[in-house]
Image: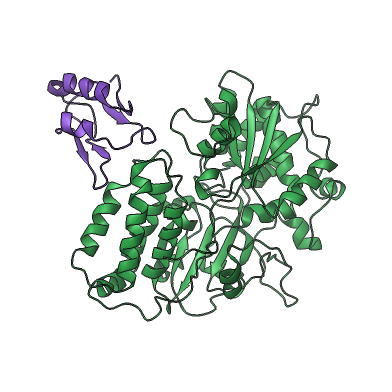
Chain colours: A green, B purple
């Protein structure tokens, strides 16, 4: 049996913003998941484990300061051999990050990022509700590996996971007690440097300057890891790197939580083995609810890929790299044939422009300009200069912000012009899609219009 | 690959508020985008322009333009 944690159909998503509720979905049989690791409690019992049940299911944590436990370096080595890569979007090797913090002088801080900034993803707060103890295990392990005396779990203010996380922390006796911090609900607030800035100064804005590993919270070496990454750490510490590699590929090992949204029968969060083709992932979500033309891979900073290419594409870092794209945060948005990809992207860019921290000119002014161009294009406003102007703007914005927000937004917009190239040309000649005014398939927070 | 070695210019995008002085003082290296924010050519500053580059960095009203050691 597999798990489906979001029961909301696209129409519900449109009505209420990003998928955030967790409701058991179906009484009918659901196709088998390839891997059940992180969400075993949900799969078996349909609810989260308490701490006692959690230790029974996964076994006790083998380390954390006891003599005879796994040494600090051995733990980091094991993570390296396991090939664990960050699950927050960048896919950076977790062992390298741990080593970088360990190599910096000073008392380390561990920050677990559960903010889930990307509107297409709901895997982090799903994980925090269904397996909070795995995340807390991972935080404890990271603290042990780095001799950290300060551990912070960041959630968006009002996150649906706050309650389960607080209850789980109260059940435990970790050597370093986890502090829960609520971060303002803005896309760029959960970017690594913005989190560090917020925890140091109270300002949730990205910064330029040294990496968190070198100079993080209060100037101390800081590990900022996604909560799912830390949950995988808890599995590697228990069962070892060889076990971990039994799922996944050489370069993308293990399982991953994946949010599937858009025109599929059962949008929701699924745990899948890295390496399955995208078509299998869509099948897990009940398959297409209507004929599909494209899939957005990697969230709002990701890429539109035509269905003909996406279907066989393996869900891995290396598979995406071969296409010149990035896996990003593990999320898929399926766009039906009867939808306008340009209008869809215009709405997303409008949202991303609105979410800019407003610090860097190319982002502050560039993203609204790109969003307006896309909206004009979608509306079929005949303008000979529109496509040229838009392409020029997409060319000058990247690489000029303090964080990667503008680059990611531009990447998404540029991929729309490639994937929906025929539509774009037709729109520029004054022929809009008949579906341009339809509600968005991409789950965006309420009140966002192009 | 650049033909030169040595210092290069960098902009702190947060500090920069688009005064545009850099593009006036150093048009060979800096151009402005449509919103008035500087775009730099890649790589080290050509040796003949180093003194000008240093002057531009000093003149930047927000000190967003910096000449790094190469």
| Image spot of residue B18 (x, y percent) | 29, 38
> Residue A408 at what x, y percent from top left?
41, 50
Query: From what the image shows, is residue A164 above or below residue A442?
Result: above
Q: Tell me if I can see residue A287 in this picture.
A: yes
Q: Is residue A314 left or right of residue A363?
A: right
Q: Residue at x 58, y 61 (%)?
A: A259
Looking at the rendered image, the quarter that the N terminus of chain A falls into is bottom right
Q: Is residue A223 above or below residue A20?
A: above
Is residue A418 depicted above or below A97 in this figure? below
Tell me the residue at 60%/33% (across/down): A199
In this rendering, position of residue A70 left or right of residue A410: right
Number of numbered discs: 0
- Tell me where residue A273 appears, x and y as whole percent: 60, 57
Decide which of B45, A234 is in the foreground and name it. Answer: B45
Q: Is residue B5 visible?
A: no
Q: Quadrant of residue A220?
A: top right
Question: Who is closer to the viewer here, A285 or A357?
Answer: A357
Q: Residue furthest right?
A: A52
At 33% across and 34% down in the image, what residue appears? B16
Q: Where does the C terminus of chain A fall, quadrant-wise?
A: bottom left
Q: Residue furthest left?
A: B48
Q: Could you tell me residue A317's position as x and y percent? A: 48, 50
In the drawing, does residue B14 fall left or right of residue A10? left
């Amino acid at each position: 049996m597999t798990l489906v944690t979001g029961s909301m159909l696209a129409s519900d998503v449109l009505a209420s913003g990003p998928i955030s509720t967790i409701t058991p979905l179906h009484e009918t049989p659901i196709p088998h998941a390839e891997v059940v690791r992180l969400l075993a409690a949900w799969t078996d019992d349909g609810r989260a484990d308490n701490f006692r049940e959690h230790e029974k299911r996964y076994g006790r944590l083998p380390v954390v300061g006891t003599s005879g436990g796994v040494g600090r370096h051995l733990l980091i080595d094991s993570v390296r051999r396991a090939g664990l890569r960050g699950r927050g979007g960048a896919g950076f090797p977790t062992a390298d990050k741990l080593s970088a913090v360990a190599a910096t002088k000073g008392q380390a801080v561990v920050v677990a990022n559960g903010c889930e900034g990307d509107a297409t993803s709901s895997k982090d707060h799903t994980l925090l509700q269904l397996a909070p103890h795995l995340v807390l295990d991972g935080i404890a392990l990271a603290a042990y590996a780095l001799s950290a005396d300060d551990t912070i779990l960041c959630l968006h203010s009002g996150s649906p996971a706050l309650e389960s996380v607080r209850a789980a922390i109260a059940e435990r006796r970790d050597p370093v007690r986890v502090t829960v911090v609520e971060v303002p609900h803005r896309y760029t607030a959960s970017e690594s440097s913005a989190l560090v800035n917020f925890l140091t100064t109270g300002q949730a804005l990205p910064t330029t300057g040294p990496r968190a590993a070198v100079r993080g919270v209060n100037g101390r070496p800081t590990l900022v890891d996604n909560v799912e990454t830390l949950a995988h750490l808890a599995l590697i510490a228990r069962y070892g790197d060889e076990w971990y590699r039994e799922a996944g590929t050489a370069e993308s090992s293990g399982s991953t939580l994946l949010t599937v949204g858009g025109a599929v029968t059962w949008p929701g969060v699924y745990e899948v083995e890295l390496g399955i083709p995208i078509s299998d992932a869509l099948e897990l979500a009940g398959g297409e609810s209507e004929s599909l033309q494209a899939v957005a891979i990697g969230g709002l900073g990701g890429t539109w890929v035509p269905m003909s290419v996406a279907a066989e594409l393996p869900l891995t870092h290396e598979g995406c790299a071969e296409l010149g794209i990035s896996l990003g945060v593990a999320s898929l948005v399926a766009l039906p044939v009867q939808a306008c990809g340009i209008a869809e992207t215009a709405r997303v860019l409008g949202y991303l422009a609105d979410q800019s921290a407003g610090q860097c000119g190319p982002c502050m002014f560039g993203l609204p300009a790109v969003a307006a161009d896309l909206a004009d294009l979608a509306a079929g406003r005949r303008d000979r200069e529109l496509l040229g102007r838009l392409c020029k703007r997409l060319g000058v914005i990247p690489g000029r912000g303090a964080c990667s927000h503008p680059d990611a937004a531009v990447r998404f917009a540029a991929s729309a012009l490639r994937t929906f190239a025929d539509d774009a040309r037709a729109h520029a000649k004054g022929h809009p899609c008949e579906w341009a005014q339809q509600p968005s398939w991409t789950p965006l927070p309420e009140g966002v219009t192009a | 690959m650049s033909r030169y070695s040595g210092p290069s210019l960098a902009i702190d995008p947060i500090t920069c508020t688009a005064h545009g002085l850099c593009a006036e003082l150093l048009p060979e290296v800096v151009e402005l985008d449509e919103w008035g924010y500087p775009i730099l050519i890649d790589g080290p500053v050509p040796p003949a322009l180093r003194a000008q580059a240093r002057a531009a960095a000093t003149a930047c009203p927000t000190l967003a333009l910096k000449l790094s050691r190469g």
